[in-house]
Amino acid sequence: MRKPNIITFITHDQGQHIGCYDSPQTPNGVKTPNLDSLAAEGVKFTNHFCTAPQCSPSRGSIKTSLYPHQNGLMGLVNLGWTLPKHNKTLPMYMKEQGYSTHLLGLQHESLDAKTLGYDTISKRGPEFKYSRSRMEKKYLKFLDEHKDDEKPFYVNIGVIEVHRPFSAWSESVDPEQVKIPPYLPDEEGVREDLAAFYGNIEVTDKTIGRILEHMEEISIMENSIFIYTTDHGIPFPRAKCTLYDPGLKTALIMKSPSYDFLNGGKTIDSLLSNIDLLPSIIDIVGGEIPSNIAGKSFLPVLKGETESIHDEIFAEKTYHEIYDPIRGIRTEKYKYIKNFEDLDTLCQIPKDIMMDSSGKIMKKKLNQSRPEEELYDLKKDPHENTNLIEDDDYSNILYDLRTRLNNWMVNTNDPLLRGRVAEKRQKVKNHY
């Protein structure tokens, strides 16, 4: 059988805000019938985490299966960081598997998309031009033009949604539809901000529906794998730019009629990281998994051969708009966070969030000194409200997680162990 086409659709800043992910930890009232249907027919991953709660570092990990401090992309591309050219990327690996490789729309890993290894790249321009409303016809045209290709194709579809400013991409939903996350107050400004966020998600879901429908119409769904994911948690205070679960938990949904293990409405609860996507794709199409990456294939989990591939996941942040180095480890039961810089607030709120109502409301509520270390019992305290760092009953757990985090930093040659990480900021008009 010919290898399957692979279509990856990646959004900005969506976390797990999709109707089918509604849960006590991530309550949402978003109407996403197309993604819900994809999950009902394919596979939904509920404990999928990003390596970093920000755009470029997380996306760089998806593309390389390396942590940001390993691949060198520790800050935002729009602020001058870029993925060093010595890194091998997913498109490059897919070429070795006999694929043609293509980029449609947004990428956030390089100042020059030509360095990422794609055979073709859609016309470059400012990020707003990668809105799904501007690009939708191009997605369908691409599928029409490549449906009869001799080679299988790998295409990455990147959209600006659901990044702020929400009003640029869609209308708000009725604020009464909104469910307030437990880490945000139920105030009018927060509810209205979330209503605008929901609006972005719902129009993007419609575009995904049109892509899936068109794939059926032109008879390529049968031998394709469709992958939906996002880069990190939602663009609200105490989510994006933090190592709390709302900043790190991300949606991942996969479907392919050709593979039993990507069908049937399965739910995978195993602890996974987005560095695992690259080796999993390579494994699924029959390639040899690279030895010099950090991720692991979750194909054995999909096939039911094992329940888990990780005892823990690691996450980090170094640069966003400011230097704010944080490292963390999360197991199924506990989370330990090490903050390496003092802040006069519990966590950073990015500037674009601060401009809107939820940021202004939460700024006062987060106005407290940040501890050097944080420890949470996720079974008793899933919303990470009670820091147990001084609790003697958890001293053995604290020692264990401290040790494991430090060992990870040593084994992955984290430059933070040698002191302040050098800034690589430069002026950027547009990145292409």
Image (cartoon, rainbow, N blue to C red):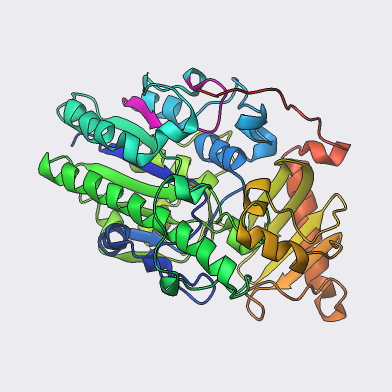
| Image location of residue 14, percent across then percent down | 49, 54
Residue drawn at (72%, 71%) of the image:
376
Q: Is residue 419 left or right of residue 315?
A: right
Q: Nearer the viewer, residue 175 or 368?
A: 175
Quarter-of-image position of residue 145: top left
Residue 408 lies in the magenta-colored region: no
The residue range painted magenta reads 98-113
Relative vertical location of residue 114 with respect to residue 38 in this rendering, above or below: above
Image position, residue 155 (x, y; %): 34, 33
Query: Is residue 395 placed above or below 372 in the rendered structure?
Result: below
Left or right, residue 392 beside residue 47:
right
Judged left or right of residue 202, residue 269 is right
Residue 306 visible here:
no
Please provide percent x and percent y for residue 101: 35, 26
Query: Is 136 displayed left or right of 79 in the figure?
Result: left
Q: Residue at x 56, y 55 (%)?
A: 233
The total number of labels drawn is 0
